[in-house]
Image (cartoon, rainbow, N blue to C red):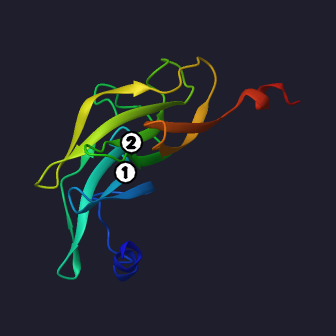
Amino acid sequence: QAGTHAAAAVGTSLAKGSLRTPAALWDAASGRYVVLFGSVNAAGGFRTRVLTTRWDAGAFATGPELELADPASPTVDSLERELVRSEGATPKILAFLEDTRATGDAAREVMGQFLSVGADGAVKQDGASFSITKLPNQHEYTPSAAWDSGAGAFFVSWSDDREEKSVK
């Protein structure tokens, strides 16, 4: 059913600005799609934002946007992103993104942020964002994640540039 809705709304913009490298998942608890995406900010960097939407009366009914990147760091670039939902009685939504805030250098790191969706469709951050990777002067990027129901944990993988530094 998700594919039907997306196909019917081709050309419809969900976000106020640009929508780059989006990731989406269905949240059965709220009856909404959660969409994580990049948007260009006033300082010229890409920021990660999240919103919810649902198909209602032939159109998307979209909740307010929430910015996940640290507002105190307007030049943080948040690029590749991923969303995963756990299973169980109290499922959690975990957003993964790459940005430059964790190390203080220009190296990209993978960050995580737990999210919840309110009855009104607004997305809320559950706690502070946290580093998945944090190696200075090395890029970690393009996170990919899954829920491991057997272990009761999120599995995260990413790309890095260790081999590229030694290739001549």
The type of residue carrying mark 2 is: Ala
Left or right: residue 98 compared with residue 56: right
* Quadrant including the N terminus: bottom left
Rendered residue at 83%/25% (across/down): 166
Rounded to the nearest angstrom, the CA distance separating label 1 from label 2 is 8 Å
Choose between 52 and 84: the one closer to the eye: 84
Vertical relation: 111 (above or below) 134: below
Say whether marks 1 and 2 touch (CB < 8 Å).
Answer: yes
Residue 66 location, x and y as percent?
Answer: 24, 45
* Quadrant including the C terminus: top right
Choose between 12 and 86: the one closer to the eye: 86
Residue 85 location, x and y as percent?
Answer: 37, 48
Q: Which residue is denoted by mark 2 in the rendering?
A: 95
Q: Residues within 10 Å of mark 1 (few under 14, many from 20)?
A: many
Q: Secondary structure at mark 2?
A: strand
Vertical relation: 116 (above or below) 107: below
Q: Nearer the viewer, mark 1 or mark 2?
A: 2
The type of residue carrying mark 1 is: Leu
In the rendered image, which quarter is residue 32 located in?
A: bottom left
Rendered residue at 22%/63% (across/down): 31
Left or right: residue 71 compared with residue 144: left
Vertical relation: 41 (above or below) 5: above
Q: Residues within 10 Å of mark 2 (few under 14, many from 20)?
A: many
Whether residue 65 appears in this view of the structure is: yes
Q: Which residue is denoted by mark 1 in the rendering?
A: 36
